[in-house]
Amino acid sequence: MRRSLLRLAESVSSKPLKLQDSNASLLPPIPLYRRLLRAHRYLVPEMRSLGDDYVKAEFRRHREVTNAVQIIGFLSQWQTYLDQMPKGAGGEEFRGKKLDTIMFEKMSTEQLGQLYELKNATKEVWKSTQDPKDGSSS
């Protein structure tokens, strides 16, 4: 394998992604997609809307990918996200987490741009849900 492919195959943690082991634990794309959307049911409406739109867009963008390493990396990251989601209506509130610096350093400029757009979109969602009187007080 070329050096760049090996770097792509690394997981977010420091250990490399083992392609043989990952096939057994990863969900196929469509069941994973459905479970992600189901997990979003337990989020507040604003977060659910944002999350659903983002999941749909990402899966659409990756529909034509044929590189096995990229597919496994994509699916494993979404599976990790799914594992962090609250389980059922009685589950704890989803708060998210800070982005790992190792993962941040591995991002391409396109990914950093998408992250910046996502940050701005989430700010707009939370601004609109806070207090509508804030902007019109005299």
Image (cartoon, rainbow, N blue to C red):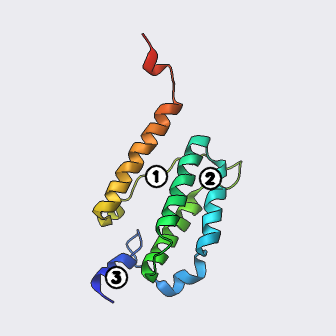
Q: Which residue position is annotated with label 2?
A: 40
Q: Secondary structure at mark 2?
A: helix
Q: Secondary structure at mark 3?
A: helix
Residue at far bottom of view: 1
* 35 over 26 or under it: above or below: above
Q: Residue at x 51, y 23 (%)?
A: 132
Q: As shown in the figure, which amino acid type bears the numbered disc 3?
A: Leu
Q: Earlier in the sequence, mark 1 or mark 2?
A: 2
In the picture, the disc for residue 8 is: none
Q: Which residue position is annotated with label 1?
A: 97
Residue 109 makes an appearance in the image: yes
Q: Residue at x 36, y 76 (%)?
A: 8
Q: Residues within 10 Å of mark 3 (few under 14, many from 20)?
A: few
Image spot of residue 29 (x, y percent): 58, 72
Of circles 3 and 2, the one toward us is 2
Seen from the viewer's position, the closer of residues 86 and 68 is 68
Residue 28 in the figure: left or right of residue 96: right
Q: As shown in the figure, which amino acid type bears the numbered disc 1?
A: Lys
Seen from the viewer's position, the closer of residues 63 and 109 is 63
Q: CA distance from mark 3 to mark 2?
A: 33 Å
Q: CA distance from mark 3 to mark 1?
A: 27 Å
Residue 138, by quadrant, is top left
Residue 43 in the figure: left or right of residue 100: right
Q: CA distance from mark 1 to mark 2?
A: 16 Å
Q: Secondary structure at mark 1?
A: loop
Q: As shown in the figure, which amino acid type bears the numbered disc 2?
A: His
